[in-house]
Image (tube, rainbow, N blue to C red):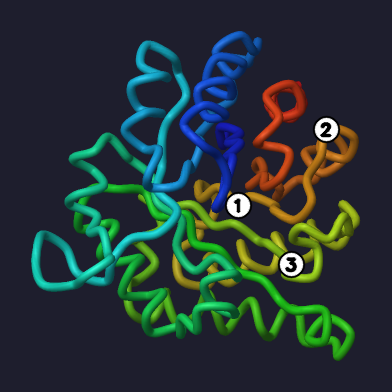
């Protein structure tokens, strides 16, 4: 049975003061032991969050990593080696904001996915279509192509140590949310694509839904057979809301 996972992507938010308040509030939340929880702070706050959540069950991840491991001349980047040394075990890869705003290609996403694994980090591979692509009926084609690039480069066995997150771009930060049936359709297709390479890996890999996940809609999403948790944006900055989502995952 796949253990539910709820991840909070804090994006480019927070000051040291507000992060301290959020950490304190998270520590007061009642989170089911059956649910794995990870937060992804801005890199500036990783050390603060690692220290503040010490002794809790909440994991810490990075929002991005460099394509190369180790050390080198790559100004402004942070390698998986450095992030792991700082206390991060997880890393987001291929988030739509990096694909669309910062121009990351499928080739770059695949390289970061492999770099994360090489550093013994767990990559959370983000996939998703734009509104125009959904309206054109291209959702499954787009998501399949994004996943296919990583499968071709890293192989299906790599997903034994990875997580997949389906985030429809049109639902990120817009207040719009895919219906539970829409989410299930895409999650099922992702698992089927992996199963064509390895049924064993496909059965075990966790697939999260992301895109305006809230306490109010999370329980219905988690009822879907192939939705194994959530990648939460704005609601993860509010400890009570995030805690409610975690509890919904544990029901």
Real-space CA distance between mark 3 and mark 2, rounded to the nearest whole angstrom: 18 Å
Which badge, 3 or 2, comes first in the chain's sequence? 3
Task: Tell me where residue 175 sits by quadrant.
Answer: bottom right
Taking 179 as reference, is 51 above or below it? Answer: above
Which badge, 1 or 2, comes first in the chain's sequence? 1
Please provide percent x and percent y for residue 171. Answer: 80, 63
The secondary element bearing badge 1 is classed as: strand
**Front-lying residue, 184 or 112:** 112
Q: Residue 97 carries which label?
A: none
Q: Name the residue under label 3.
A: 168
Please provide percent x and percent y for residue 69. Answer: 16, 63
Q: Mark 2 points at which residue?
A: 215
Real-space CA distance between mark 1 and mark 2, rounded to the nearest whole angstrom: 19 Å
Do residues under tags 3 and 1 come within 8 Å of each other at their CB atoms?
no
**Front-lying residue, 228 or 26:** 26
**Front-lying residue, 228 or 231:** 231
Real-space CA distance between mark 3 and mark 1, rounded to the nearest whole angstrom: 13 Å
Please provide percent x and percent y for residue 16. Answer: 46, 31
């Amino acid at each position: 049975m796949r253990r539910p996972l709820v991840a909070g992507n804090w994006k480019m938010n927070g000051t040291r003061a507000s992060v301290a308040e959020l950490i304190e509030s998270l520590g007061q939340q009642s989170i089911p032991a059956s649910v794995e929880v990870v937060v992804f702070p801005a890199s500036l706050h990783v050390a603060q969050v690692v220290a503040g959540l010490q002794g809790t069950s909440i994991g810490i991840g990075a929002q991005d990593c460099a394509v190369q491991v180790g050390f080198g001349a790559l100004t402004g980047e942070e390698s998986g080696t450095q992030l792991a040394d700082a206390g991060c075990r997880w890393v987001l890869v291929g988030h739509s904001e990096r694909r669309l705003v910062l121009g990351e290609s499928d080739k770059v996403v695949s390289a970061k996915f492999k770099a994360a694994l090489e550093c013994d980090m767990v990559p959370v591979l983000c996939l998703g279509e734009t509104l125009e692509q959904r309206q054109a009926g291209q959702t499954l084609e787009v998501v399949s192509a994004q996943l296919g690039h990583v499968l071709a480069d890293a192989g299906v066995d790599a997903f034994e140590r990875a997580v997949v997150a389906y985030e429809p771009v049109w639902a990120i930060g817009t207040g719009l949310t895919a219906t539970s049936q829409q989410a299930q359709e895409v999650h099922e297709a992702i698992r089927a694509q992996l199963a064509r390479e390895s049924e064993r890996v496909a059965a075990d890999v966790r697939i999260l839904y992301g895109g305006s996940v809230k306490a109010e809609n999370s329980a219905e999403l988690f009822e879907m057979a192939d939705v194994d948790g959530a990648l939460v944006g704005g609601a993860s900055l509010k400890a009570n809301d995030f805690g409610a989502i975690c509890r919904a995952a544990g029901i």
